[in-house]
Amino acid sequence: MKKSIVFFLLISGLSFSQQKNLKIQDLQPKSENFVFPVVSYAGNPAVANKINTFLQVNELEYIPNSGGNPFKLASTATNSYSNYVYFYDWKKLETPKNILSINMNGEASGAYPEEFSDWKNFDLRTGNYINAEALFQTSASKTVAGLIQKKIKKRVNDFLVKLKSEKNPSEEVQEQIGLYEECFMDYTLNGIRYFFGKNKLTFVAGRCSNHAMRALDDLGSHELEFTYKELEKYLSIYGKNLISGSEKIRQTGPGNKLFKGKIDGKYPITVLFNEINEDDSFSATYWYDKNKKPINWRGEFVHDHFSITEDDYHSEELKEWIPKALIEADLKGNKIIGTWQDYKTKKYLTLELEEL
């Protein structure tokens, strides 16, 4: 009981002014369709660089300081998912001192326009993106996911009771009932958005409707609040240290992290690993520091081992991607050690990376 009291006294006693050296401005060239955050942090410029690199590569597919307009791919739909993506505003949220949470709002347009709201959370001690699953003990992840699912189901079921209580339901109400009865609610920590508040963590689950049915969806996205006190018994040591303001840093997995190193001991590269999915698959973007042109990886991460394919081109004749290289490597602490093999010549080159 005493430990719990001390933990929450630490949270409530944090000095939020400790983030006073952190500033967020608009990435240039700012325009009506592109209001995008760029961070400066006088107390730790390296942390700011990591955050900005993650945001720009992850959201804009742009490598910082590579020249040209950082919004070009997003504004011309020449990004990897062929959608126009616009960013209309951002907001820094009030959080414990170790955490930066940024809310970004915009619109993505493929076959149709779709508004979006997203949140990005960073550990200000390291500059690393905060993965939701890292906040909790491994044994408690399913329990926390169950708590989230329970809240979603209650919200949906309460609304269903209200809809079904109507004596002569209209066709629209009947369609709504069908929509909510088929709603996907089995979200896991790996597939849900979230953001930090001063005293609570809010998970944001997607709405029950697809775009075509959106007009019928009165509930919209599910924002589910949990106080840090409610979650305290499920938190990992990393999560407790992060939220309480401790400077003690624990190692977390490679997902959503930046690594720097060399191929063949002489070609400097930087790698941004994306999220490690529940089936162990992942994608990544890397670039040679000299030319800063993005190259994509896809692979699996199992038992601290990476098996990665670097594609060369897509064969229309074979209807498949033709590899350029195959990478096999092991995670050893904060380093990745392995080989980069040319697919055609079969020549092996060393690969050595270290977490930034």
Image (cartoon, rainbow, N blue to C red):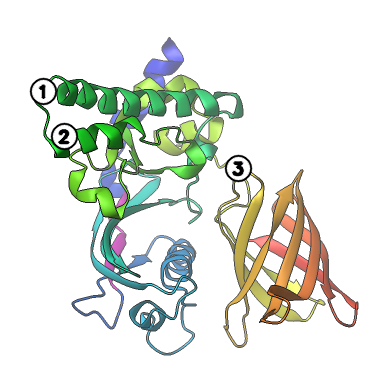
Q: Which residue is mark 1?
A: 166
Q: Which residue is mark 2?
A: 173
Q: Nearer the viewer, mark 3 or mark 1?
A: 1
Please tell me whether mark 3 sits on a helix, a strand or a loop.
loop
- The one nearer the camera, 296 or 122, is 296
Residue 155 position within the rendered picture, expressed as x and y whole percent measured from the top left: 26, 27
Residue 237 rendering spot, x and y as whole percentages: 55, 31
Q: CA distance from mark 1 to mark 2?
A: 9 Å
Kind of residue at badge 2: Val
Judge the density around disc 1: few (<14), some (14-19), many (≥20) Cα neighbours within 10 Å. few
Q: Amino acid at mark 1?
A: Glu
- In percent of the image, x 78 and y 74: which residue is there? 325
Name the image quarter holding residue 350.
Answer: bottom right
Marks 1 and 2 close (CB-CB < 8 Å): yes
Which amino acid, by three-letter code, is at mark 3?
Glu
Q: Residue at x 59, y 40 (%)?
A: 250
Q: Is residue 254 left or right of residue 343?
A: left
- Determine whether 221 is above or below 354 in the image: above
